[in-house]
Amino acid sequence: MTTTMSTDTTAGPAGPDIRATIAAYLARFFPVQDLTDDDDIFELGFVSSMFAMQLVSFVEHEFAITVDNEDLEMEHFRSISALEGFVTRKLSASLAQ
């Protein structure tokens, strides 16, 4: 099942909806009405090197995490699903410390 992007950023009991927050951010920059959670935004040509750095900055500020040099792999930023998984792992790791 493929989920299309929603801009609902309603916070749930565990905090903001990570996927919806990421989707809403991307919707500000791309014609994403048909973008699904697993669409590769690099392959679709939506991302320049400048926007890639802007995306890293957004993730750090929005979710209060640090993107380390070893985290700067395209696989973490390639899609809404990949970003959601990356942010979730980083948040879980920071809670475990």
Image (cartoon, rainbow, N blue to C red):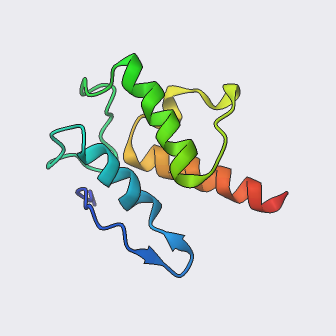
Q: Residue 41, position in %: x, y?
A: 31, 33
Q: Give the residue drawn at x 59%, y 27%.
A: 72
Residue found at the very far bottom of the displayed protein: 13
Q: Where is the C terminus found, in terms of image quarters?
A: bottom right
Between 56 and 33, the one lying in front of the other is 56
In-image side of 54 versus 68 (left or right):
left
Residue found at the very far front of the displayed protein: 61
Q: Is residue 93 above or below residue 26?
A: below
Q: Is residue 51 above or below residue 65?
A: above
Where on the picture, by quarter, is residue 94? bottom right
Q: Residue 83, position in %: x, y?
A: 48, 45
Q: Give the residue drawn at x 25%, y 61%.
A: 6
Between 44 and 26, the one lying in front of the other is 26
Q: Residue 48, position in %: x, y?
A: 34, 19
Residue found at the very far right of the displayed protein: 97
Where on the picture, by quarter, is residue 26? top left
Where on the picture, by quarter, is residue 52? top left
Between 39 and 28, the one lying in front of the other is 28
Q: Give the residue drawn at x 22%, y 46%.
A: 35
In-image side of 50 versus 34 (left or right):
right
> What is the total number of numbered labels drawn onto the structure image?
0
Q: Give the residue drawn at x 47%, y 78%.
A: 12
